[in-house]
Image: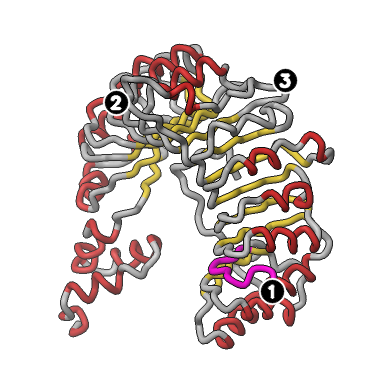
Amino acid sequence: MAVIQLPEEIWMHVFGFLSNRDKLSVRSSCKSFKRLIDHWSLWKNNVVVLKKIGAYNAHFWRTLGKRKTKSIVIQKATVNELQKLVTWLPWICSVTLVLCCDATALTKLGTLKNLRRLVIRQCRCPRLASSLLSLKPLTHLCLCEVERASVSEISGAISQLVNLTTLYYHEDKNPIPKTVLHGMLRCLPNLKHLSLRMGPKYGILPDDYFCLSKERHSQEMGAEVGLTSLELLNYEDPCLSTAAFCGLSSLTKLTVHYKGWLVDPNLCCLTDWLLELPLLSELNISLGYPLSVYAKTIPRRVQSLSLMGVKAELNAVRIMGEQVPDLLHLHLDLCCHDSCDIIKEMPQIFPKLQTLKVRHQDVPASLFLGLQDLPRLKQLVILDATQSPSPTVLNLTQELHVQTNNRIHVLHSLGPKDQTTCTCGF
């Protein structure tokens, strides 16, 4: 066909707009497209999920080699299967192991010189501590529901990974003992992002549980290093005290996933924590206390806010808007009865919003279309729309596009789940 004679650069540009499924469809149409589609530039951020490595032949691995695949998710991997990965894709930089029961499989990853990100989920790894010692270049480590050695052995191994910038430790049923946590953190000068599963309520941890500024100061390190991001999963008060965040003034992001809904405002530690975080720019809360309990304490610098399953009334949302007048990004998935009123006042409460994630629910079309009055809004995500939106949602989308001259990009879902992330958060 004459159209095939177009410069390859043009085709590559066009193919860059396709989804993975569409790329594979085009790839099967002819040899020329197959060669172009396999170019590495079209797969730079692609994650390949392998369920049975033994089922893939040499041609499959060569194709991944052409695409320079750098991120792999492997389910139920064995030593021999990981050896194939190491042999065919020696440049791999991100590996996620799920349901791996081979105790020695991890040792094969030590030969991957570019491996920087390792996620281990729902695996039996009794030799995990010794295996981690061969992975010192890691910058990102996630351990989630892993059968392994004692906490002290694991913390000792993690302490050797001095290049870590991100640590997800979703292991024990109870919080990590303070001495063990501080022992790890003193040895990780580059750590910026920490995620912990706190476990059930069993008492109050020491006030200085997160007092890293005192614990990290030493002549050898020369300077203190502070976390910028902290995530607490499965949390319930009063596990941490009201003074727990006194040593975390460097935080710019805080995420708290509560175990359930809470009522008694006198037990809420979040209000005190927020007062200690002057640099906070992103706050994510799931469940927990009603918004009215902490709305007045949200730091003014916050520009990104997510409230999921939080009980709230219109007045609490108004107060929150006064607290964060420069809010740019809002994920509002509330448990409330006046969602229509909140949608109606959204342009007045949050006039600077650029991205908004919200439910359509039973909000009348006329009110929902009022979101176009947000003058800076660029992206709107309708959280309760399915992959096949209803005619009502499609009409709303079309109307918003027309009335804003396509200024607002409307999405009908949050997109596919990242297979490389931990499943503890939501």
Is residue 283 in the magenta section?
no
Q: Position of residue 97 (x, y in %)?
A: 41, 33
Circle 3 crowding by C-alpha within 10 Å: few under 14, some 14–19, many from 20 = few
Cα–Cα span, label 3 and label 1: 43 Å
Work out whether 347 lies above or below 313.
below
Q: Position of residue 304 (x, y in %)?
A: 56, 56
194 or 334, which lies in front?
A: 194
| Circles 3 and 1: CB atoms closer than 8 Å | no
Mark closer to the chain start, 3 or 1: 3
- Could you tell me which residue is drawn at 43 percent across and 37 percent down? 192
Cα–Cα span, label 2 and label 1: 51 Å
Residue at the disc numbered 1: 348
The stretch of residues the image draws in magenta is: 347-357
State the SS at label 1. helix
Q: Quadrant of residue 366?
A: bottom right
Work out whether 394 lies above or below 88.
below
Give the total number of marks visible in the rendering.
Answer: 3
Is residue 352 in the magenta section?
yes
Mark closer to the chain start, 2 or 1: 2
Whether residue 34 is visible to the viewer of this picture, yes or no, is yes
